[in-house]
Amino acid sequence: MATSTPSTDLPRTRPLTELPEQANPFSTERTVRTGDVDTGKRLRLDGIARYLQDIGTDNLAAVGASETDPLWIVRRTIVDVHRPAEYGRTLRLRRWCDALSTRWANVRVRFDDPGDAPDGPLIETAAFWIDIGPTTGAPTRISDGLFEHMARYAHDTRLKWTAWLPARAPDEVDDERVFPLRATDLDPFGHVNNAVYWHGLEELLPLRPDIPDAPYRAVIEHLRPVAAGETLTLRTTLREDGLTVWFTVEDHTRAVAWIGRKPDALRWTP
């Protein structure tokens, strides 16, 4: 395994913003079930991704935006696991927007204990979502009503996209494997569902079994969708500070992910 000195000045090490005091974000609860945990009863990353998709849909419906802004795609998702959730635990999920522009938004979701138990599970997430026109398939303006609602707790209303992860895999990798796709991995548009990429990351965690011993961070950036019938290959490099995975079809990267333990110098505030 190649090694390198962990860096705390990379974009992927930036701490997430805090929930503003007096904020009243959209909130719901969910109990961790058997379909979303691993053999150690830990809530898997793909389970977290499904929860994020569901609360997003519920949030749009709750604010009356299901008709005006029905379709969103995710460009990047960040998951910070401070204290993992386990089978049987009921989680409180709170969702708010901390930055946005006219066509996209950075949306935070916090998973924690409904009773604020100090030793309860704590998972912080952030996702860069793009509003897509259902007829054009292109980025579209967020409706005025939804923009006003999302901007309530935003510290930035001129959000710009900046990639955090390298889009191209090196010529030499430490692990390369085909990742077979199933019919159930596809969404109504014939593309691989977002949660499946996290499934692939879970598949590679045995290469670094120390990482799920929280706290840790995982990041996925999506470049292009994977479609039905394509052969997906995972190409992985292992470093001291974590592993990086390129989801490739032939020589083209469709997504890239990084997962690693929390650097000591990174100010994560549970």
Image (spheres, rainbow, N blue to C red):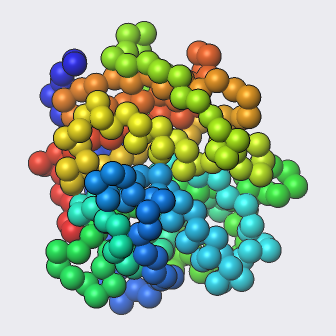
User: Is 69 in front, or is 81?
Assistant: 81
Query: Residue pushed farthest top?
Result: 171
Report the number of discs. Answer: 0
Q: Is residue 156 left or right of residue 243?
A: right
Q: Residue at x 31, y 65 (%)?
A: 86
Viewer can see residue 177: yes
- Is 113 positioned to the left or the right of 27 in the image? left
Q: Is residue 38 placed above or below 54 in the rendered structure?
A: above
User: x, y (%) of residue 150?
Assistant: 56, 75
Q: Residue at x 36, y 90 (%)?
A: 22
- Position of 36 relative to 177 (above/below): below
x 45%, y 81%: residue: 29
Q: Position of residue 58 (x, y in %)?
A: 62, 76
State the residue lying farthest toward the left: 264
Q: Position of residue 138 (x, y in %)?
A: 77, 49
Can see residue 11? no
- Where does the N terminus fall, quadrant-wise? top left
Viewer-proximal residue among 218 and 85: 85
Q: Quadrant of the C terminus?
A: bottom left
Left or right, 44 with reference to 157: left
- Residue 132 in the image: x percent, y percent? 74, 56
Vertical relation: 115 (above or below) 228 = below
Is residue 190 depicted above or below 127 in this figure? above
Q: Nearer the viewer, residue 265 or 74?
A: 74
Query: Relative to residue 164, is residue 264 drawn left or right?
Result: left
The residue depicted at 25 percent of the width and 48 percent of the height is 212
